[in-house]
Image (tube, helix red, strand yellow):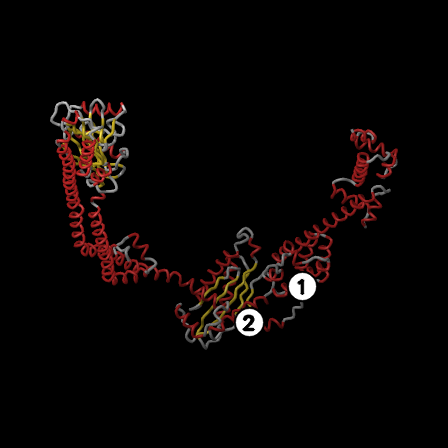
Amino acid sequence: MFKSKRFRNNWIMILLISSIPGLIFGGFIYWLAGGRLENELLQMHNKQIQLRAANIDEQFAYLETSVMHWAFDPSFSYSLASLTLSRDFEIARNMTQTLANMKGANPLALETELFLEGAAPVRFHPQYEAITSAVQIEGYRDLLAIDKKVFWSQHTSESGFPRDNALSLMVKIPETNENPFGVIAVRLNTEKVAKLLQTLAPYTDGGTFLLEENGDRLLSSSGRGPASQLDEAIKSEVLARKTQSGSFLFEWNEATYTVAFGTMSRVGTTWTYVTASPISAITKPVVFISQLVLTLSIGMLLLAFVLSWLASRRIYSPIAQLVNLLTGKTGIAALRKEQNDDFKIIEKEWLNLTRESMTLQNKLEEQLPHLKEGFLLQLVQGYLYSYSEQALLERMRNFGWSVDNRQYAMLYIQLSGFENLEGRFSSGDEGLVTFAAANITKELASSRFEQAEVLNFHDLSIGILIILSEGIEKPEVIRTFSQELTQGIHNTLKMYVSVTIGNLALSVVHVPSRFEEAMQASSRRRFESRNQIIDLETLDELEKENHEIHYPFALEREIIQAIRVGHNEEAKQLIQAFMDELLERGAKVIDIQQGNLQLLGSILHAIRLANLDPNRIFKSVNLYEQLMQIGDPLKMIAWFHDKVISTIMAELESRSDAQMKKTVEMTMIYLQTNYMKDISLDSCADYAGTNTVALSKVFKQVSGKNFIDYLTELRIGKAKELLRDTDMKINDIAEMAGYQPSYFNRIFKKQEGITPSRYRELNRN
């Protein structure tokens, strides 16, 4: 149904009508959620970063203010330079307490320390201790040499070197003096600062870091670890922009990050904070809403799809039923491939049906004669025996015959003399000749009878069904028609015609039996080259005529003897004489067939007595059936020669060859066993049960050698084996081979070209 163009158009229209509200709603939600909300979230994210960055800036500012406030404490006055802290324990303890208070007052401070320059540099860490390491002393003095009262540095008390990882706030004391003699260092807690920076980008991916004025990395939300490739790439992009603040989108590893940066004013310097967050994390709520909206939209579209499909099927159902009715379920698919408009299909099919109806009507008129002929063939051959009289009459009426109060006459026509038509027709033209004769018959029958049908059997035989009015005896016109028919076919085709007129049938169901009687009666015709008419009403009078048939038994014996001795041509001539003697006294067709069947039976009986199996020789072919199908004397003679006698002759020859081979094989075995004895062709012939001449001939034919040569090669071969493999004397070997010693030397040298002793010497060397 979906292949229909009209159905698709209706369905698409309904689908669009039902989907428009959902599409408008989905588009609006997508614009609102996917566009504006995403932008709002990004702007909100940037504002939150600015607020959080301000909070971090305040905490660093609080640390700076607090440390500077402590630096103005009287405890860190210039008087410290004149005190001997190693003896002033009370002052040292107070100093340690003050440093501890400073650390406790600042959440970001990890530890505080105080360095004092003098004859003996000391530091509080936070306890008092004397510095003995020249490297540490040098590191603190570098800090004092910096031209700033308050500054940030990455100096640590552990190494004494600046630029370490720990970020510290340095305040020189006394702060009011131009020549400070000490420095307070507040070291930041890196982990707490990292957590504080993480508030700028609270996502698993991305990160936050601080940069100095020169672009060096100070702190990062990842802690003490080295900078990632993403951080380095973002840092390069931020420095390349050469602005103090801003935001941008950054692509990295098939992910998009929103990057925001700004500055923090610190004492003596300016820091730049940089934070990067993945857009997917920021817009995650929007994505969820979009997916929800998409899912709902798809569900609504599917619902609209199903509802529109059902509505379209309901609307289209009457059209589909009409199309299926016109085209059929098997043909509609092929039609819709060519044209999808159902109304055009309906129009086209209507025209096709009209055209096909006219075509079928014409074909029916053309095929009606063939259908009538097929029906008659089935009727006369008995295939419609299960039909009743009324059923047969009804079928005949449908074919246009008038069968009410009718009787039926059957004629069987057989043509002969086809072999005498050499030059006009060739072998295999029997069907053509029968067709010509059927046309002549049909023309003559239509001129004589109101209803007459001709049946062409294509085997030089024709049948005629004549429908006559009931109550009228078989008129003389049928016999007159038969005479005209025989003369017309004979004059035109130069063939002899035999017409058998069957008895009348008073009902259609008796037509097959009447036709069978006519066919059987045709075998009662004379086996003569002349036209004949057989009427079953006068057949009994013909049977009373005394025609005694003489069977030539003497010729039968001569034929069998010629077959036994293998005289092929003589057997063929005798069969010709046998057939002539059967025809000599005016025999009928049935007499000729029975005589030939008797001859065939005698031949098969004779070959059985000769220990030959007819079933094997003739490959189980039914020879009697083949012979019964032949109605011409010349064909019978040729059949006997080609199919029977030649086959038996070939079998006898092959059997003779096998016996000959068996005799030679027996002789060879005898020679191989008795070669050392005084053996001759006569003794071998006696052993094989034959004469010397025959044995010599067949021995040469089978082995390719004459008897003496074969025996000599056999004996010399055995002698060579004894010479090679034994130490027997040559005279003994000669006797073992069946020779006298003196003759053995001569015959061996004649065969091998060397003497026996020389042969032994050569083979042993």
Report which residue position mark 1 lands on: 598
As drawn, is 419 to the left or to the right of 286? right
SS category of the residue bearing label 2: loop
Q: Secondary structure at mark 1?
A: helix
Relative to 644, is 135 on the left or the right?
left
The percent position of residue 15, horizontal first and vertical second, equals 21, 55
Question: Which quadrant of the structure image shows residue 762?
Answer: top right
Q: Identify which amino acid the numbered label 2 is placed on.
A: Leu
Residue 536 bears which disc, if any?
2
Q: Amino acid at mark 1?
A: Gln
> Which residue is found at the position 20% from the left and 24% from the top?
117
**Alpha carbon of mark 2 to alpha carbon of mark 1: how far?**
28 Å
Residue 163, percent across and down? 24, 27
- Tell me: residue 474, above or below residue 327: below
Nearest to viewer (mark 2 / mark 1):
1
Instruction: Specify the farthest residue to the bottom.
Output: 471
First in sequence: mark 2 vs mark 1: 2
In this orientation, which residue lies closer to the viewer: 282 or 587? 282
Nearer to us in this view, 718 or 178: 178
